[in-house]
Amino acid sequence: MKKLKKEDIPQEVFDLYDAYAHNKLERRKFLEKLSIYTIGGITLPSLLSFISPNYVDTITVKPNDPKLISEFITYKSPKGGGEIKGLLSKPSENEGKLPGIIIVHENRGLNPYIEDVGRRAALDGFITLAPDALSPLGGYPGNDDDGRALQKKRDKDEMLEDFIAAYEHLMNHKNCNGKVGVVGFCFGGWISNMMAVKIPTLKAAVPFYGGQPSNEEAAKIKTPLLLQFAELDTRVNAGWPDYEKVLKENSIEHTAYFYEKTNHGFHNNTTPRYDEAAATLAWTRTIDFFKKKLI
């Protein structure tokens, strides 16, 4: 059986996966269309396995890293899902108050990749909280397919309230300096944009390939924005010109980056959509932005 490499995969396969991952294509149809690309010794199971998340071999910061204190907590979301579970992480040797970051997951709950991102940011000198919006339904179920199915059962505005409540919890945490930002990916990118709309005191927002608020909502933003886009992500990028126009018309502080030849999800190191150079640069810019705005 042929050993697959990223360069073996046509862009159409990444587009198919994007449609499937965002509930635009049901599984049977996805597999049917994917089978077209099983040529030259590539089998459907091997192709599906290659493009699916690998959470076993991709963790960059272990949960028990001695440089961190990382533990699951619960907090109240009275306007959202009630009791919400989240991963709270901070450097183990820091005794003072730290700037805070809310880490917002994609459309499948708090999976190992997002937990890892929370720990990465903590190692950079922040106290981070990565909530699981699937908490009212039992939490992330252990795989992304079931996670997506569960998240579809929740109202997105109620989930937004869960992350707003996370902001309030972290801002008032004894180890936080009261300055809190947010970074989110995909669905979490939309949440990051909407938290900027809803929370005037939010100090910084970094949406990665996130859906945009309406023009009316965008005009209310007071939060500085750092927006990260994938060049090949035509679905999300289609909304950027209108969003950019509103941000400029209202003199809202913002910087946007488009990463060449990258797909939606390029920061996620668990799938072949990952682009190491772009992800590294985008994350460096993210941490630098947070250090500038939160410290």
Image (cartoon, helix red, strand yellow):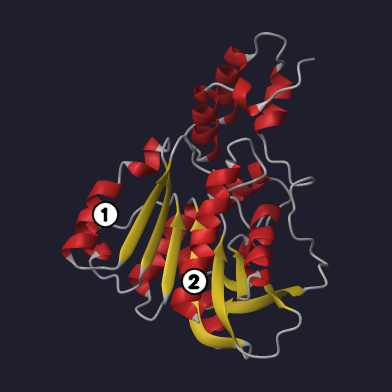
The amino acid type, in three-letter code, at marker 1 is Tyr
Badge 2 crowding class, 10 Å Cα cut-off, few under 14, some 14 to 19, many 20 or more, is many
**CB under 8 Å between discs 1 and 2:** no
Q: Identify which residue, 156 or 192, lies in the foreground.
A: 192
Residue found at x 72% / y 16%:
43
- On screen, residue 68 versus residue 122, left or right, reads right
Q: Quadrant of the N terminus?
A: top right
Corner quadrant of residue 42: top right
Q: Nearer the viewer, residue 127 or 153?
A: 127
* Residue 61 screen position, x and y as percent: 75, 60
Residue 80: mark in rendering? none
Q: CA distance from mark 1 to mark 2?
A: 22 Å
- Rendering quarter of residue 223: bottom left
Type of the residue with mark 2: Phe
Image position of 36 with respect to 112: above or below: above
- Mark sitting earlier along the chain (1/2): 1
- Establish if 187 lies above or below 89: above
The residue that appears at 63% across and 70% down in the rendered structure is: 124
| Residue 147 visible to the viewer | yes
Residue ranking furthest to the top:
40
Residue lying at 34% horizontally and 59% vertically, measured from the top left:
255
**Left/right of residue 138 with respect to residue 287 in the rendered view:** right
Q: Is residue 72 above or below residue 262?
A: below
Judging from the image, what secondary structure is the residue with disc 1 in? helix
Question: Looking at the picture, how far across and down is residue 25, in whole percent?
Answer: 50, 31
Residue at numbered disc 2: 290
Which residue is under mark 1? 243
- Is 189 placed left or right of 17 in the picture? left
Where 281 sits versus 217, above or below?
above
Decide if residue 154 is in sight here. no
